[in-house]
Amino acid sequence: MKPIKVYGEIGRDIDPEAYEQLKKACELPVSVSGVLLPDAHVGYALPVGGVAALDNAVSPAFVGFDIACRMKMGVLDIKPEEFEKARKSFAKILDGVTSFGLGADFSDGKREHEVMDDPRWSEIPKARELKDKAAKQLGSSGSGNHFADIMVGEVLKEKPWLPLKKGEKFVALLTHSGSRGTGYQIASHYKDIAESKTQEDHKGISKNYAWLSLDEHEGQEYWNAMQLMGDYASANHELIHKHFAKEAGLKIIGDYENHHNFAWEKEDEDGRRIIIHRKGATPAEKGVIGIIPGSMGTPSYLVEGLGNKESLWSSSHGAGRTMSRTQAKKQHDEAEYREFLKESDILTIGVARDETYQCYKDIGRVMELQEGELVESVAKMHPRVVIMGGGRKSDDGD
């Protein structure tokens, strides 16, 4: 088995099953090394919060089904006190310009972006099949843990790239979404191909741990499709921020973005082509800006990477779940949830029972395990408006 670096305690911070998932990945013949970040929990094949480096190979299952899912943050030109006075109005505007949930789209033609003119839609057969679907879902968000939040934050450390001073309060729009149904179908298509190719030379390898060589056509085609999904996911966020700012009469004075569920190429000391898969993990190269969200009711962080090689230049991508969605629905305490919303004064729309703060890890502990080692916190933000695709109408009830 190749080496695994763990940030946190197995059994306390991280489910032992998540470690076993990464261990299995690090036993593959193409494996180089692995990392388990403090938000890690059991996922599909690779654990969420897991990082796996492979030698000249890419695994569609390790990248994940929501290819290039990402975070985007836009600092808005409005003072927190002004925002608070009109918070319900801004929440209504944000709800109006977003489309959440399974199958959500803008099929009436309200969304346009130059990403749909990218020649790769025609060059990649599977992408060509899905272009119409992608066009309809352009600018929309998925279900589950995808969100659009308006937050009030405070600057912890000044940076040349941040147009704010230390201690200054600000308002920001944070969004979390990916490549929608198109990304899911592309992931599924190439996962099947990877399983067939891997079994040709490595019988007995679990299907979920299959890979594609980047020396072969199938691997190169998936790599290009993954890059296209990255650009498509980015366009979805850009449209949400653009339309909100326009409808709200605001300007975005600081714009930051990063993604997970993706694979990055890096050359090692021996000149090998190493592919770093970050399944629910954020790039944290030296100086790279990151966004680490908490839950719908806890703080989020704007960070800068410290370039830690042991972590494969990665950090967590959020707080991480403490339980499955099924468990969360069963254990949900509605009275406690309502009391929490009242005390914290958070305006919510569409937060499902399996997506409340009750089923997520303590973001403070998650940040403690990586602060000063993997990342440096630059700003801390608190949710004031939270919109998700969970089906609830508003914070006033179901």
Image (spheres, rainbow, N blue to C red):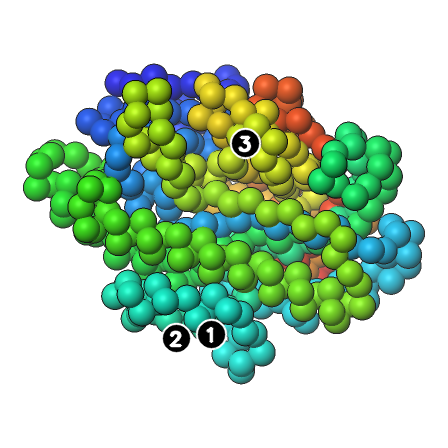
Of the numbered discs 3 and 2, the one sitting upstream in the chain is 2
* Cβ–Cβ under 8 Å for marks 2 and 1: yes
- Asked whether residue 391 appears in the rendered view, the answer is no
Q: Residues within 10 Å of mark 1 (few under 14, many from 20)?
A: some
Q: Which mark is residue 136?
A: 1
Residue drawn at x 30%, y 25% is: 271
Q: Percent from the top left, x then y, of residue 91?
A: 75, 63
- Residue 21, percent from left and from top: 33, 30
Quarter location, residue 398: bottom right
Residue that numbered label 2 is attached to: 132
Residue at 68% from the left image edge and 50% from the top image edge: 255
Q: Quadrant of the N terminus?
A: top left
How many numbered marks are there? Answer: 3
Tell me the distance, in whole angstroms, between the alpha carbons under discs 3 and 2.
Answer: 35 Å
User: Does residue 239 appear in the picture of this structure?
Assistant: yes
Nearer the observer, 178 or 323: 178
Q: Mark 2 and mark 1: span between their CA atoms?
A: 6 Å
Q: Amino acid at mark 1?
A: Lys
Which residue is at the far bottom?
108
Residue count near mark 2 (Cα–Cα under 10 Å), binned few <14, some 14–19, many ≥20:
some
Residue 143 horizontal/vertical position (percent): 51, 58
Residue at 39 percent across and 63 percent down: it is: 182
- On the image, the x and y values in percent for residue 123 come to 29, 65
Q: Amino acid at mark 2?
A: Asp
Residue that label 3 marks: 284
Q: Pick whichever, 154 or 242, lies toward us.
A: 242
